[in-house]
Amino acid sequence: MKLRAPAIPLITVDPYFSVWSYDNINEVIPFHWTAKPNTILGVVSIDGIDYRFWGVSEDPALEQVGLTIDALSTTVLFQNDAIRVKAVFTSPMLIEDLYYASRPVSYLSVQYESLDGAQHQVSAKITVSEELVLNEKKQSPVEISSVHIPGGCSIRMGNQNQEPLNRAGDNIRIDWGYFYLSAKWGGSTGYTKLGDMDAICVETPLSPSGLFAFAYDDIHSISYFGDHLNAYWKKDGKDILGAISEALQEYDSLKAKCDDFSARLYQEAVEKGNEQYAELVTLAYRQVMAAHKLVVDTEGNNLYISKECFSNGCAATVDVTYPSAPMYLRYNPELLKAMLRPVLRYAESDAWEYDFAPHDVGKYPILNGQAYFKNARERQMPIEECGNMLILMSAICDAENDASFAQRHLGLLHMWVKYLIEYGEDPGNQFCTDDFAGHMAHNCNLSIKAIMGIAGYSRILSRIGNETEAAQMLQTAQHYAQSFLTRAVNSDGSYRLAYDQEGSFSLKYNAVWDKLWNTNLFPSSFYESEMQCYRNKALPCGVPLDNRESYTKSDWLHWVACMGSNEDFVFLTQGLWNAFHCTDRRVPMIDWYRAENGQFMMFQNRTVQGGLYMRYLFQS
């Protein structure tokens, strides 16, 4: 990977079980996606002398000589004059297999080879601090105990005060459940200290390899309208010790599946774009998967709950699901349906009194109803969320070649399309997802979202055989599109940020669905003029979101890249690659930054990077 990853994924399971590093991983204290420390130390003992390969300590460090990142594994090479060590971190979050997408076990394989021709006695030791089980270190005493697993050794650690799902919010870490550190076959476990913190450790001989497993049993994962729900992996009665033992035994075969998936993902990206694009989607994959939690409700329905990371901590946020959807449309639309089920349930309940779609269903991990200004009508995002939901429901129909999911909620969709028809042609003073520089009336891109939402509903109706109403809806979308083309055009042929702002511009990313669906609501001249505008406005790290500020959004920048020629795609992808390569924020991928230099604005580790897979949905 030529891209200098802003952060390196090491353990990536869910919004709480998340460990990252950057650059040389034995010069950085491992950290949670929030950038708070998750202190871990990895040491190899070579003929009785300790050398660190992960984390920070007083032990001498092996030289890091190689780093490779693919979609599911991170491989780091170290060496000194005597041996070379290969550490392979794998989180097998296979999107096409719900069990592995949910099972909270991540691997570290450590192996060595002699460089000096001599025989060496080598072992590896991993030490994990209490920071993985507490929101803040020292907040509570921890409980530590050895546990038995067939075919290995294991030790667990957790808060002595177990209160599952006791808090909700953004910049917090889990303080319930138990972390398990395990090794396959021979090894020893123990209690120790890392600085002033309690810690657990496992040491195993390398002959010439050893296998560690990191696992977390959060007991209950999501509070959902009063029910405490378990993770998907538990649905058939499996417990965490069984899951760890199973994981250790199947490592070789599962790693081969991960390698195959990662290779296919990368190759498809190269074919759709180029190597820079492939590096971006590769780096995004584990981040997107691990910012969700897959659970099962009391009726047996899959729910895939996103966390709006470093924003406000909202859960099941519609305008976060919308940009993240392409990755799931490409690989597993069931997970996208599982994202929408909480929104649909809430919107169909008496608790939601509005005739438009909600923004969210709670604050992670507690989903009991909208957290974002629920009782302030003027702070809602009606066109934004109605358009998002209708577009996504139509896209799911395409991905599955089946309209049954949408058909079960047709009454709700009909109500939302009525809202778009009434208010979408020229939006009033409404909030939208991009109101970073202030909200406004007459938002042209918001109008395009309404147009595509109406068109999406038309496509759903056509699939279920209601051709008459489908034609009426398509005619409305066509009429609104013509209205947009007439009123939004600038004198230079580009299109405005707002209908009443001559000379303004914005990224018209919502029109990507018109290109994808071949609905031809907007002529080729629209896309050509917009692409020329974006090229003219481009800065080293992308095109600004609109004319008001120099910042941009990674997801939307990629979506507009998909609206142009192959040359346009490569040109715009270069700016996006530059942003992540040079950003000053050493955390998982950010999505709101300055287009001149990649400087962090806000938002990190968000699921919206799934939007970088939009190109995968195009056939050529």
Image (tube, helix red, strand yellow):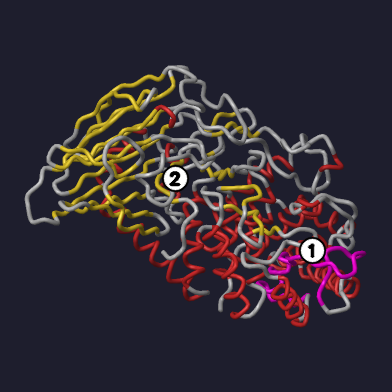
Coordinates of residue 482 in the picture (x, y in percent) = 87, 74
How many angstroms separate mark 2 from mark 1 (CA)? 35 Å
Mark 2 and mark 1 residues within 8 Å of each other at the beta carbon = no
Q: Is residue 186 left or right of residue 472?
A: left
Badge 2: residue crowd in 10 Å (few <14, some 14–19, many ≥20): many
> 486 or 299, which is in the foreground?
486
> 152 or 241, which is in the foreground?
152
Q: Check the image and report above or below for 93 versus 134.
A: below
Q: Is residue 340 left or right of residue 267?
A: right
Q: Please state which of the two labelled residues, at mark 2 or mark 1, is closer to the viewer.
A: 1
Q: Write the start and end of the magenta stretch as one range.
A: 494-521
**Residue 506 in magenta stretch:** yes
Badge 1 is on which residue?
547
In the picture, the quarter occupied by the C terminus is bottom right
Dominant SS of magenta comes to loop
Q: Which residue appears at 47% of the width and 73% of the height?
A: 270
Badge 1: residue crowd in 10 Å (few <14, some 14–19, many ≥20): some
Q: Quadrant of residue 526?
A: bottom right
Amino acid residing under circle 2: Trp
Secondary structure of the residue carrying numbered label 2: strand
Query: Extreme left residue here?
Result: 118
Q: Which residue appears at 30% of the width and 58% of the height?
A: 256
Q: Check the image and report above or below for 136 versus 594.
A: above
Badge 2 is on which residue?
20
